[in-house]
Image (tube, rainbow, N blue to C red):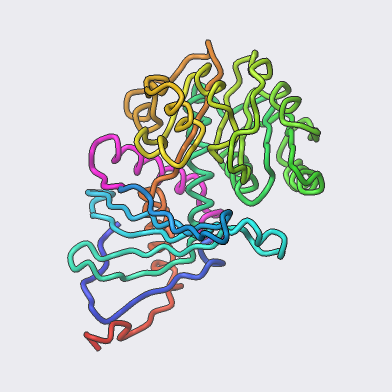
């Protein structure tokens, strides 16, 4: 990907509908972009500061998060930018998506922003790509699972399932649980065309986990609620995307994989709570970037839990990809003389 031409006058916008089309027409490329960003991180070519959380004392469930990031020598060019993403769970009661976002890209030489893109689609895609990439590595690089479960069946779960399907996974039975059973049913019915043995709905997380070789957690849980070690006796793979579902005790009994240890030990995630209880971090032996570079993945002697905090570098990697697609297809909305001091 070439750097944009140096210009202090232009600014481009990419709409969400164009981004979604580009993402789902190129799922394998999106996953590869996320893989390359993780590898760059493992090789020390990234700057990924802690996320900044804007919280509201009178609205404790709501937050807006800033994720700045930089990747050096990413497909031959430096990549710099930020994602600004809000999470307002009450939106679901208004029939509005919980998350909204923008992604900004900055010129590597001048620092000027040159593109603004609808970011919720980018964020969901990088989360889905990260989950499916981890599933592949932790599943012995086999794109097959007899029973795949989802706890929480909202937008993120749908993206993750769609990425499994679009990237060629063979899925036997689909299992689903949601605090709102109608959501689980809608998710299962929509997704069942891409599985070989139909779907099964569950009244509680425990029965689902016992039935599945691999389970995705994608809820809005603010604190751990699941603490049943017997449900993990068959040593499943848990893609703990929402980060706060599992008790610290379950974390300590398992093989743990994160995206970045420092980032994940933050915000009262389940691994962070385990660190607070024990005063140590050595229960996390693996990172996904490290596995991608070294090939050293955990064995199946314990449950395997992947807890990704989410990294701004992934948003930049996916954002750059869809920006270049929009530029190649002449779909950019250009705003000349955007910067008043250079008009």
Q: Quadrant of residue 142?
A: top right
192 w.r.t. 148: above or below: below
Is 34 included in the stretch rendered in magenta?
yes
The quarter of the picture where the C terminus appears is bottom left
Left or right, 143 with reference to 274: right
- Is residue 254 in the magenta section? no
Horizontal and vertical percent position of residue 72:
23, 49
Q: Residue furthest left?
A: 109
* Nearer to the camera, 313 or 334: 313
x, y percent for residue 81: 32, 59
The one nearer the camera, 340 or 205, is 205
- Pinpoint residue 126: horizontal percent, then vertical percent: 47, 48
Q: Return the residue found at the far front.
A: 57
Considering depth in this image, is 136 or 127 the residue closer to the camera?
Answer: 127
In magenta, the rendered stretch is: 20-48
The residue lying at 49 percent from left, 66 percent from top is 118
> Which secondary structure dominates the residues rendered in magenta?
helix
- Give the residue furthest to the top: 301
Picture quadrant of residue 261: top left
Q: Residue at x 55, y 34 (%)?
A: 240
């Amino acid at each position: 990907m070439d750097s944009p031409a140096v210009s202090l006058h232009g600014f481009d916008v990419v709409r969400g509908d164009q981004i979604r089309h580009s993402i789902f027409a190129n799922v394998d490329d999106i996953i590869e972009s996320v893989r390359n960003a993780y590898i760059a991180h493992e090789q020390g070519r990234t700057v990924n500061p802690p996320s900044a959380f804007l919280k509201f004392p009178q609205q404790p469930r709501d937050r807006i998060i800033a994720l700045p990031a930089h990747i050096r020598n990413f497909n031959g060019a430096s990549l710099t930018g930020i994602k600004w993403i809000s999470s307002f769970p009450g939106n679901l009661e208004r029939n509005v998506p919980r998350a909204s976002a923008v992604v900004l890209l900055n010129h590597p030489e001048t620092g000027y922003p040159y593109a603004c893109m609808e970011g919720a689609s980018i964020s969901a895609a990088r989360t889905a790509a990260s989950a499916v990439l981890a599933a592949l590595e932790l599943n012995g690089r086999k794109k097959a699972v007899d029973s795949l479960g989802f706890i929480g069946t909202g937008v993120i779960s749908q993206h993750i399932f769609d990425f499994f399907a679009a990237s060629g996974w063979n899925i036997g039975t689909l299992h689903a649980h949601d605090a709102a059973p109608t959501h689980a049913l809608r998710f299962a019915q929509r997704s069942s065309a891409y599985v070989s043995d139909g779907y099964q709905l569950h009244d509680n997380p425990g029965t689902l986990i016992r039935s599945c070789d691999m389970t995705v957690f994608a809820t809005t849980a603010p604190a751990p609620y699941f603490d049943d070690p017997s449900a993990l006796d068959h040593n499943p793979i848990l893609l703990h995307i929402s980060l706060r579902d599992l008790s610290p005790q379950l974390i300590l009994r398992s093989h743990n994989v994160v995206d970045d240890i420092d980032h994940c030990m933050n915000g009262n995630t389940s691994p962070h709570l385990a660190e607070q209880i024990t005063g140590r971090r050595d229960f996390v032996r693996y990172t996904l970037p490290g596995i991608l570079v070294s090939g050293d993945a955990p064995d199946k002697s314990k449950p395997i839990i992947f807890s990704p905090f989410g990294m701004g570098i992934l948003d930049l990697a996916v954002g750059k990809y869809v920006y270049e697609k929009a530029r190649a297809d002449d779909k950019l909305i250009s705003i000349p003389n955007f910067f008043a001091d250079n008009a």
